[in-house]
Image (cartoon, helix red, strand yellow):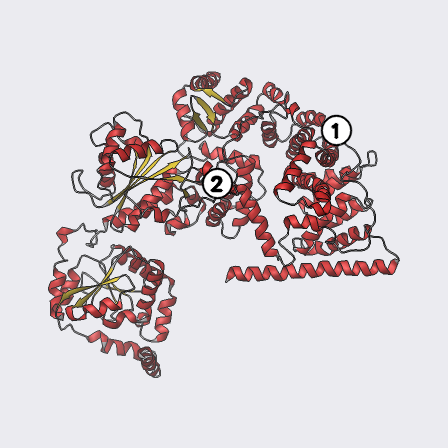
Amino acid sequence: MILGSAAGVVKELEKHGPYVMPKWLKETVGTLEAKRPALGKSLRALPYPILTTNYDGLLENNDRRAIDWTNSAEMQQIIAGGSRSIGHLHGIWSNPSSVVFSDKNYDRLLESEAAQSLQRAASTLKSIVYVGFGSGLTDPNFSRMIDWHRSHFFPSAVDHFRLCRTRDLDGLRAEHGTDHIIPVVYGDDYDDLPSFLEQFTRQDMVELSKAGIARDLVGESQTDFAEEMKGESILAETLDGILDRPMSDVILPPILIPVPHAEYINARTKKSTARVARLDPAEEIKLGDVLIIAAEENSGLTMAVKWMTLEASRFLVGAAPIYVPFQTCKKTRRPIQEQVRAEAQRQQLIRKRDEALPPYVLGLDDFTPYVDRISEAALAEIAESEALLTIIGCAQGVEDELARRLKRLGVSARVRYLGKLSAADIRNYARLVSPSDFESLAEQVLTALQVENLAKTPFTVSLLLFVLVQGGRFSANASQTSILDDFVGLLLGRGDPHDDARFGLDQSAREAILSGLAQTFVEAGVGGLTEIDVQESFQAVFDKFGWIESTSEVLGSFIDRKVLRRKGRYIEFSRSSFLHLFAAKRATLDKSFRSKLLERPIYYSAAITDYAALYRHDADLLGQLSELLKREYATTAHGSMFESLELAPPRLHDEGFDDLEELGSTGAEADHAADTLVMRDLHDDFFDNKDDRDLPPFPTTHEDDVPPAVQLFRTLDLVSTVLRDSDQVEDLDLKQAVLADVLEKWGLAMDVMHEDSSFNEFLKRLLIDLELAKPEKDGGKALLEELGKAIPAAITLGGIETTLSSRKLTLLLERVMNDSNKPPSEESVIMACFFHFSLREPGWPNKLTTLLRSQGNIWIVRNFLLHLLTYTFQMDDVEPDDAEDLLDLCALIIQRSSNYKDEPEQRRHRAEITSDLQSARLKSRVRKGYAKSIAVV
């Protein structure tokens, strides 16, 4: 009603011209005089930011001038304590455009993102004292802010206060019973307010800013702590406007679990065991006085301790976050307290070391209970600490001893473990960096983690994301070796402005040292050496180049950089993929060492493929590896992937495969969104349930002692990858010959796996475990036979996609397919189809149609490739220009497998096939749009 009346006033005034409203404000609000000047004087004397909803300037003087909400930068200064001006939240009469009077004015204020953000920031982080508001808190602006605070912070960690008379106390308690505002009595009458306020005007009780406003030292320490954490984040360098972003846009909460990660994974993968749930780190800080966080090496312990420390200080409102690395503690009577006071002084929480500390939360990082004298003294301090909460980070393995010693001192500490990132977590990290491309970006990170067997930690994921988006571009086509090379390069200081090769080691020098160490490992046939042996390897490099460096300092630097690690009494590369990479780098320079690797190419395949990706033009390597393809593998025609099928009565594309569909379908009613989610869930479960412990650097079983199918797939993986990455080899005839042999052997590999006894035994156990072997259907023999072909075919398709498919081989593939001197085999033709399907270059359905023109009704086409093609068409996963050609190809394959009575039946059947596939495609589009609508809502 009031706003409606105000709108009527404004409308009437505006009838008389644009100057009437300003004149009216000046002659009314602008001429007001204070009846109680003492109250204004008491308010102005407060050394705190002052905000008002009044339009008048009664509070202002030369010391404290008026600023209104339309000047967001100045309002920010006021709220931050950097200005003594008085902020007018609803405008000032001298700036009529700022006055919030009618409903339209309120709408403008509520739509101002800057104004609302500032009010919410003040409401969230500051204790607000409401003076003389009466029913003013019910206006649209304040009621909305109070509702927002109640919904986002309940219970609130920051209390607000409303000054009132004694007689109003009970009513206001009832009014504010469900929010964060506490009524405080200042006296019986309005005249008691000035004297009540005067007790808060003493400036000698607070630290003042340059503007003369009381500094919130604890609040500033929390802000500075958060800014330092943002600066330490690897992701910070990939983000624009980092200073203006909240910490949640840069750093995600740590993953906390109640048991070690290996035990957590084990519990997830056992059907009979209840899954161990993750813990909420924001809730963990609310329980108990001492929290121990145990973590594996290089898993992000420091950032986790800092995040928990800051979050706890914010929850406890008036507490400062103080972080102390245990390594800085010295052998004194109070080792922790000395470092706490030094840090408090650095944060300007105290001026002198002997001053009283404000309430604080202590984050004690990298603690070990085994440091002589220091550990015992530190534990005694923790038991008697004044810290509101102590968060102790330690290496996994010492947490039980730490908890036991604390319990002996009367402290019951909770132990939590730092978990690894899941696929969903990695998507969240990618979303921070690239909200529009995060799915593709996350997929690249997931692939790199699995292919290179890297640790699933925030540090590793953040560094990979940085590698993929550095320079402001999305490196969508980066190879795994180049990603790994960039990743390791950053660890070694690539782009570090402090590295100066004239006065020390730079990235290039560090790579030379590690390449020499990798060669030493390979030649010794080991994955680790004693510290003395490692330093001797370093010294050999220094002597070769005439460098003067300390081997022990260099070793310590590599460990700090997370490239090497200590494991017992041995030094190893932090990940086996690092060893392969540096062995490859050494092979590019040392021909004899390269020959050493080629003596056992399958054994050293990881290093050889990295070498090919780095060097890219070694024709001799390609020629030598092609000899591996000449080995013969015995197969039989029975049950072959390429056996001819009998023609069947006309049917649609998805009829007759009920057994196979039971494995992957969610039912006839399943839509595209559900299928996509199911597939992603399966992929995520595989990733999440796989431990990221490093694998041995080289195979533990001799390459000649594994089944033939495994030998062949390892060989094809190696030769295909080297062929793909040898794109700068100029001998096209050699590359064409190798490609022809590779394609034929990939086709053979399916049959070799299909007939492998160990694979068939595995498949039988799988059917029993999944309860898919049905007695009423020949004990599952038919399903076993179909899966015995489908799984090798799927593995082969995946192998070609990940190791061979490349645009740079398409011209050579065309030459292989059109070689009249050596016509391609049936196996080669089908593998060429797999190649084009994996690559999906424009026009690929036409290329498949051409390749399949001479092929008959064989199993691999009718019962495998057709399913891929129809699914791709139905799910609308093809470019519009290729859709019609793909539809024709699907119809062609189905018709080739059908036995028709006459030509009219053939035409009717084609029409039915086309209609069925187009209908399925249309439904998929509708379901996609529906799923997207749900996501938007």
Query: Does residue 149 appear to the left or right of 621 in the view shown?
Result: left
- Residue 842, given in percent of the width and then of the height, sits at 69, 49
Using the rendered image of the protein, determine whether residue 866 is visible from the camera's viewpoint: yes
In three-dimensional space, the C-alpha distance between marks 2 and 1, rounded to whole angstroms, equals 41 Å
Reading the image, the residue beneath label 2 is 267
Residue 134: image quadrant is: bottom left
Q: Circle 1: is it few (<14), some (14-19), or many (20+) Cα within 10 Å?
A: few
Numbered disc in front, either 2 or 1? 2
Q: Earlier in the sequence, mark 2 or mark 1?
A: 2
Nearest the eye: 397 or 312? 397
Q: Where the N terminus falls, by quadrant?
A: bottom left
Q: Which residue is mark 1?
A: 633
Q: Secondary structure at mark 1?
A: loop
Tell me what residue is drawn at x 29 percent, y 64 percent: 178
Q: Amino acid at mark 2?
A: Ala
Residue contact at pointers 2 and 1, CB within 8 angstroms:
no
**Up/down of 553 relative to 795, above or below:** above
Residue in the foreground of this view, choosing between 358 and 809: 358
Residue under the image location 25 percent in, 72 percent down: 135
Instruction: Tell me which amino acid carries mark 1.
Output: Tyr
